[in-house]
Amino acid sequence: MPRENKTRYAILGALSVKPMSGYDIINWLSKVTKSFWSESEGQVYPTLERLQKLGLIKSEKASSSGKRLRKVYALTKQGTKELDLWLRKPAQKTLLRSEFILKLFYGKRLTKKECISHLELREKEIHDELLYFKNIEDHIESDHKKLSDSFYWLITVNHAKAHLQSELKWCWETQKIINNSKNKK
Amino acid sequence: MPRENKTRYAILGALSVKPMSGYDIINWLSKVTKSFWSESEGQVYPTLERLQKLGLIKSEKASSSGKRLRKVYALTKQGTKELDLWLRKPAQKTLLRSEFILKLFYGKRLTKKECISHLELREKEIHDELLYFKNIEDHIESDHKKLSDSFYWLITVNHAKAHLQSELKWCWETQKIINNSKNKK
DNA sequence: GATTACATGTAAGTTGTTACATGATTAA
DNA sequence: TTAATCATGTAACAACTTACATGTAATC
């Protein structure tokens, strides 16, 4: 059995919030699902076409401010059904790959200092990401108070924040452990 | 620029611990780097061949207990150099995709009960995974006390455990939040 | 006698990224 | 006028999974 295409559901879900163009979807997802889902252009546009052929979405051609055509897609009844069916199925595990942890896993080959600097770099990234999610949170709370979507959006932001905070703590503890270890290097 | 192949480094790293066959590598990685890195057969065997052609690893043909040939690979000097070079470079971010969080993100389309059941399912998975890492931890501590590798292996196990524990806590809190919310569904 | 573990590999297909092409509009 | 943003799309390629083919040896 081939792998199930998950991109479709991310897109169908986005369109369930409001009709959007491909460009809108890419930007919206990259902002608001940043911590747990990403899509690239090369995926979104062809998938939109496929979904339309399948009758799960329909496009209403609309021109934006300029003359360049802009295709705004909306869910069809069938698309809505398909989305809701998928949402109800238990989630499959999606494996992550962390290059950072892989490097640390082989940390024996590095000096203490080099390991610590990997950890410090990650620490900085985490700080930036926490700031980012603080902003996203404020943005969701102010702009979308009316939408009941925002309730679940904030829950996923909490998830990201909890993850980052626990990783930050682990970074600190790990640096201590490494500094106190008796390895020569 | 094409994406950099990370599989090579996972394999080179594995061979830096001890010479192994493709089969060994697959099993070892799937056990010990489970939480942050996975490789499939269809990746490992062709990559081993490529790495050999590049002179980064060499195989010593050896037969195992039976007659079936078994290729044990070891790092060459060049391969060691390549690995160490990569280990010292700052880690690139690897994006994760969580189907579970994506479903919850669109949770507005589900009933409270359905959302809770997604969370409960995840809770069970986390329990199992925590148990798994407890076992791995004991295994690393007993079998590999002599190897100084184990120091860093345990650090990555800590990372996985911290992540899981923070997610578990978030699961509980989220269930409370959903139960207390005033959504109709 | 059947299943599981050992062991290597290939084929087919899907999924995904990156870089590019194209072109309009708006703001510095 | 230069750059950024809006906007859609394609081509090339890399990465990845799944299923299968093949065969031995040990165990239940």
Image: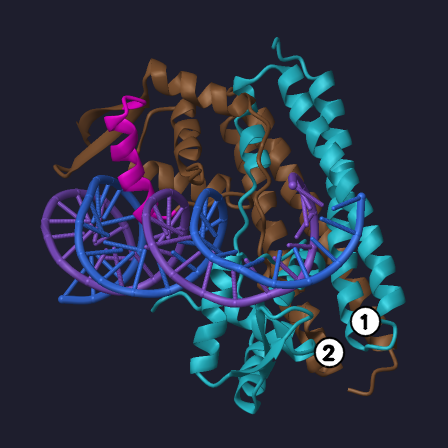
Chain colours: A cyan, B brown, C blue, D purple
Q: In the rendered structure, the residue with mark 2 lies on which chain?
A: B
Element on which disc 1 rests = helix
Numbered badge on residue B108: 2
Which picture quadrant has residue A171? top right
Q: Amino acid at mark 2?
A: Lys
Residue B43 lies within the magenta run: yes
Q: Position of residue A76 (x, y in %)?
A: 56, 88
Q: Find the distance from the CA under tag 1 to the CA under tag 2.
A: 8 Å
Residue B86 lies within the magenta run: no
- Looking at the image, the residue that sits furthest to the bottom is A77
Q: Is residue A88 above or below residue D15?
A: below
Q: Amino acid at mark 1?
A: Phe
Q: Which residues are magenta?
A: B40-57
Q: Position of residue B139 (x, y in %)?
A: 53, 36
* Residue where numbered disc 1 is placed: A151
Q: In the rendered structure, the residue with mark 1 lies on which chain?
A: A
Q: Is residue A91 above or below residue A78?
A: above
Quarter of the picture holding the N terminus of chain B:
top left
Proximity of marks 1 and 2: CB atoms separated by less than 8 Å: yes
Depth order, front residue of B138/B22: B22
Element on which disc 2 rests = helix
| Prevalent SS, magenta region | helix
On the picture, is A138 further left or further right than B113?
A: right
Identified at 68% across, 22% down, the residue is A117
